[in-house]
Amino acid sequence: MGESAEQIHPKKAYGWAARDSSGVLSPFNFSRRETGEKDVTFKVMYCGICHSDLHMLKNEWGNSAYPLVPGHEIAGVVTEVGSKVEKFKVGDKVGVGCIVGSCHSCDNCSKNLENYCPKMLLTYGVKYYDGTITYGGYSDTMVADEHFVISIPDNLPLDAGAPLLCAGITVYSPMKYYGLDKPGLHVGVVGLGGLGHVAVKFAKAMGVKVTVISTSPNKKKEAIEHLGADSFLVSRNQDEMLPAMGTFDGIIDTVSASHPVLPLLGLLKTNGKLILVGAPEKPLELPVFPLLFGRKIVAGSAIGGMKETQEMINFAAKHNITADIEVIPVDYVNTALERLMKADVKYRFVIDIANTLKPTSSI
Ligand SMILES: [Zn+2]
Ligand SMILES: [Zn+2]
């Protein structure tokens, strides 16, 4: 056998980890690598709680490695940079999202689409190049190759900005790629959670007309008055849905539970696009006739490449786009995850790492 994790990773770190698929988090001591020549090490200030943290914690996608330190909406302040780092210096505000590695040589990587690199490495819960397991942002420090570190502009707050590193890019990237970012277009947002609420904000900033499509009529006031949506459709209400048929250029569907897509296809104009960014565990039923008659597209999208993630953060800073957050202490994290499972949060939990995560003597 080769070196132990402690030999490869001599720097002491601490955070909260799940030890098994119960998904229950508790204090955890571990270690991180020294700052390599291309690495940026930073003190974690805030980390968002993403819905995929729930899936990973409970091993619902079948690939979780334990102990599992989640967190891929990580924002902090640089404490050390390697000798060959060009973009960052000590004291800079930075973030790391879902990715900490890719091959840098495949077709996707050459097009700044590291997110679609077959060798892409996730920020937590997977094997890194040195054989150790990657640990995420529910921890005191983070180290990553500068290529995967995002610069956070001064006017973007680290707490409400952190969720943009996953939720933000997840909705921004498809709006750009599928051309739903043009002023005057009509775009729907299905589901008003962590992803959906920032989708509304980005779409408004891009100048499109935004309609929130939801099963719960009680979200209407919030969607229009607080988030700035232009209109609201209750998807189960035929009196509202029928007049809206054929009026959407595109729909960003953020729902991660199984749901019917037929009504959404009906809402699209000819050439309209239904873009799925949530990940339902079971296959969706896809009726083909509505696709043929209207030349409609059903497509997917997953986060974004590093160049586009930086572009998204800069766009957010310019347009004052942040997530609506509930800041919590780290010892509230298990309760927060239970509440997230019930969609009982407006709209993203963010852990105040710097002020509430304390070193622990337990393993
Ligand atoms: Zn995420
Ligand atoms: Zn690649």
Image: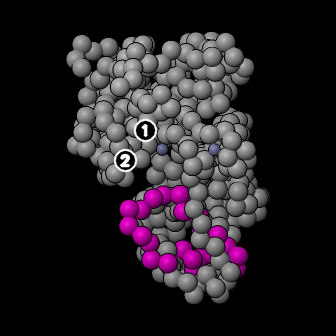
Give, as a single range, the part of the protein colored magenta.
264-286
- Side of 181 relative to 221 (left or right): right
- Side of 214 relative to 77 (left or right): left
Give the structural element (helix, strand or loop) at label 1: loop
| Mark 1 closeness class: few <14, some 14–19, many ≥20 residues within 10 Å | some
- Side of 53 relative to 207 (left or right): left
Task: Residue 91 in the image: state x and y as whole percent.
Answer: 62, 13
Task: Residue 72 in the image: state x and y as whole percent.
Answer: 48, 36
Camera-nearest residue between 99 and 350: 99
Q: Is mark 1 within 8 Å of ligand 1?
A: no
Callout 2, which amino acid? Asn
Quadrant of picture, ligand 2: top right
Name the residue carrying label 2: 63
Report which quarter residue 102 is drawn in.
top right
Quadrant placement of the N terminus: top left
| C-alpha distance separating marks 2 and 1 | 8 Å
Is residue 64 in view from this perspective? yes
Name the residue carrying label 1: 126
Task: Residue 159 in the image: state x and y as whole percent.
Answer: 51, 29
Quadrant placement of the C terminus: top left
Callout 1, which amino acid? Val
Task: Residue 62 in the image: state x and y as whole percent.
Answer: 34, 51
| Mark 2 closeness class: few <14, some 14–19, many ≥20 residues within 10 Å | few
